[in-house]
Image (cartoon, rainbow, N blue to C red):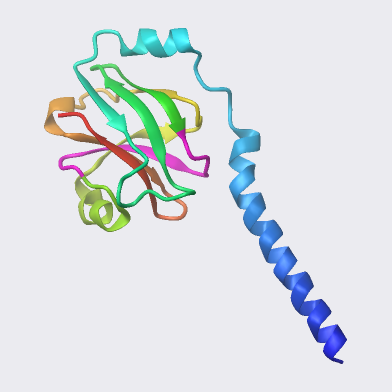
Amino acid sequence: MLKKLVLTGTHLAMLAIGFAIGIYTLPILIAPKGPDQAALVAAAQGAMFRGEFRRDLKGSDFFHWGEGKVSLTPQRIAHEGKLAPGPDYKLYLVKSFVEDEDGFLAVKGEARLIGDVKTFNGFILDVPAGVDLAAYTTVLVWCETFSEFITAAKYR
């Protein structure tokens, strides 16, 4: 009886571990190829604002982080760097710098959604018409599915 209980417990534990690994690796396996260096440089030309994603933010950890340069033009936001892979990333503009989940959740109602981040080795997103970049100070990457802070960069 004890042997069956131990085997059941270990099999369930391995199933849970496999499921967690699948959730983490699936976005990596299905992610589209990121923009090449020339496209990132071109998208950053004439940037009005610049910032930097850093790994050492309060809300960042081993699985949730970003690093690299962020350039904002009236038409595009370009990131040259890396993000920890994960599902359902969104890029937001925020009026004040925040660096963790609680800080973002407190201002999310006022944040401006820019779009989906689907690549982890740099991205280029179009700025929706009518968005005034000067009305915000921070660009932030958020995992919508798990309500996880990934990274943020103050640009002004």
15 and 113: which is toward the camera? 15
Height in image: 64 above or below 3? above
What is the span of residues highlighted in magenta in the rendered image? Answer: 83-97
Q: Residue 153 location, x and y as percent?
A: 27, 35
Q: Residue at x 27, y 58 (%)?
A: 102
Numbered label tally:
0
Q: Residue 54 location, x and y as percent?
A: 33, 37
Q: Residue at x 86, y 85 (%)?
A: 3
Quarter of the N terminus within the rendering: bottom right
Query: Outermost residue toward the front?
Result: 56
Height in image: 91 above or below 44? below
Give left or right: position of 81 versus 69. right
Height in image: 3 above or below 62? below
Q: Residue 99 location, x and y as percent?
A: 27, 48
84 and 86: which is toward the camera? 84
Q: Residue at x 63, y 44 (%)?
A: 25
Residue 85 is inside the magenta segment: yes
Query: Outermost residue toward the bottom?
Result: 1
Q: Quadrant of residue 26?
A: top right
Quarter of the C terminus within the rendering: top left
Q: Quadrant of residue 111?
A: top left
17 and 104: which is toward the camera? 17
Q: Residue 142 location, x and y as percent?
A: 38, 45
